[in-house]
Amino acid sequence: MKNFALIAVLSLLLSCGQEFAKIKVTDEKSKIIEKIFEEVSAENIEYLEEVFSDKMKMVNPKEMEFDKSSFILGIKDMYDLFDNITFESSDGNADGSEIETNYYSNGKVWTSIWNNFSATGKYTGQEINIPFHISYQWEGNKIIEEFQFFDMTAFENEATARNAQNNTSKKISFLIEMRINKGKKLNEIKSFLSELTSLMRKNEPEGYDYGYYISGDGKKVTLIEKYLTSEAAIKHADNFEGGPNMKTFLEMFTLESFIITGNSTEQLKDRLKAWSPEYRTPIGGWSH
């Protein structure tokens, strides 16, 4: 038994001493990643076409997967959104922005970069500085996988501003003015709206804003709903009319006006014609 325990301890010590990966910061692959960002800053797509495998996949911060052609189109779209794209230099001393390559004992090779993306929005005029982390897996001297980790808010805001200025946004908003019916208590209303909000969050991921606002005299409520597309707004109408809550909703509120803003599709207009909404299309500005 003592011999078995001794062997177990020795095995543990030996396994702890084994090298599972080597980290390098000045190797060829690390230098390739460094050059990628130099070329991105210079708006040179050709180098990216060369070093990324035709079989590559890219996974963005929202875990959406793209192939090489979509990845390249995304880089070109970034150039349409931003001017003066720059990155910090990496010196390999672990004091700031860095690039390092891990050579694992199983033969896999990954390079990671920690840096900051700086640029000026072409449509908002906002100057941004975003920290990011990206990891790349290699197959020979080609990048086969890319995984991105950063906050996409600035990119989404700039795309929204572009869509608004170009009048190409697909987003739809409902602005509904309602009168609270006699006999309905505020605590009863709040409880019912809490249930509706919970259902909305659970079943309609493309509805990104859903708020009720009461007047100072407690007699009226404004409902604001926002959807990424007309199709998402149609889904909401289907869920509302086909669900168990429409009867209670209409017993609680009387609709006084219903305005729909955005570039509504004909399908949406046909679906909601029974509610007689007023449609308004964008002529300027931008919104989230």
Image: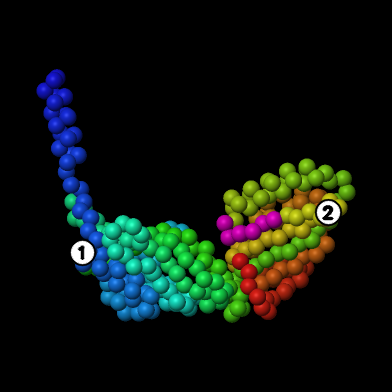
Residue shown at 64%/59% (left/top)? 209
Answer left or right for 76 relative to 175: left
Q: How many angstroms separate mark 2 from mark 1 (CA)? A: 67 Å
Q: Are marks 2 and 1 in contact (CB under 8 Å)?
A: no
Question: Compared with residue 233, is residue 218 higher up or lower down, i.e. above or below?
Answer: above
Q: Secondary structure at mark 2?
A: loop
Residue 249: horizontal and vertical position, in percent? 76, 51
Residue 249 sits inside the magenta stretch: no
- Location of residue 242 with respect to 165 vertically, above or below: above
Magenta-tinted stretch: 205-211
Q: Name the secondary structure under disc 1.
A: loop
- Nearer to the camera, 139 or 279: 139
Please give the name of the residue rendered at 52% of the width and 74% of the height, measured from the top-left corner.
121
The residue that mark 1 highlights is 27
- Residue 2 image offset from top left, x and y in percent: 13, 20
Amino acid bearing label 1: Asp
Tell me if I can see residue 66 in this picture. Answer: yes
Q: Is residue 208 within the magenta segment? A: yes
| Of pointers 2 and 1, the one earlier in the residue sequence | 1
Residue 137 relative to residue 153: left or right: left
Disc 2 target residue: 216
| Residue 7 picture quarter | top left
Residue located 18% across and 47% down the image = 19
